[in-house]
Image: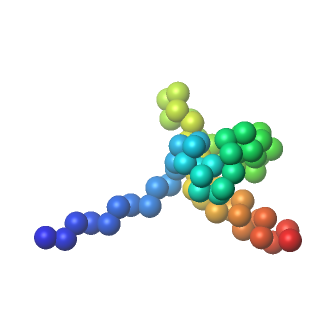
Amino acid sequence: MKTAPSPVPICVRVNDAARMIGVGRTKLYELIAAGEVETVKLGKATRITTASLHDLIRRQRGAG
């Protein structure tokens, strides 16, 4: 019996988001404060949208 592939997450925890783009938590929080990365509050939890991480990297690649 085949198992279904895991769905791609649309949001991740702060630590996971920082690891995904290769920065520390402090730098990620700076990016959030600057409006470069989108967050979502789910109750008390803060999550980072993976779409905003992809957008950030696209913008950075175009700026060089």
Classify the position of the N terminus by image quarter. bottom left
Q: Position of residue 40 (x, y in %)?
A: 58, 41
Residue 26 location in percent, x, y? 72, 39
Number of numbered markers: 0
Residue 32 visible in the displayed image: no
Colour theme: rainbow
Q: Is residue 41 left or right of residue 22?
A: left
Q: Residue furthest right?
A: 64
Q: Does residue 6 sit above or below 39 in this rendering?
A: below
x, y (%) of residue 59?
77, 65
Where's the C terminus, which quadrant? Answer: bottom right
Q: Is residue 26 visible?
A: yes
Residue found 72% across the figure and 68% down from its top: 58
**Residue 44 placed where, x, y %?**
52, 27
> Does residue 47 appear to the left or right of 4 in the view shown?
right
Name of the residue lying farthest toward the top: 44
Seen in the picture, residue 29 relative to 22 is either above or below; the reply is: above
Q: Is residue 29 left or right of residue 46?
A: right
Residue in view at x 64 percent, y 63 percent: 54
Q: Nearer the viewer, residue 18 or 3?
A: 18
Query: Is residue 57 left or right of 13 when viewed as pictured?
Result: right
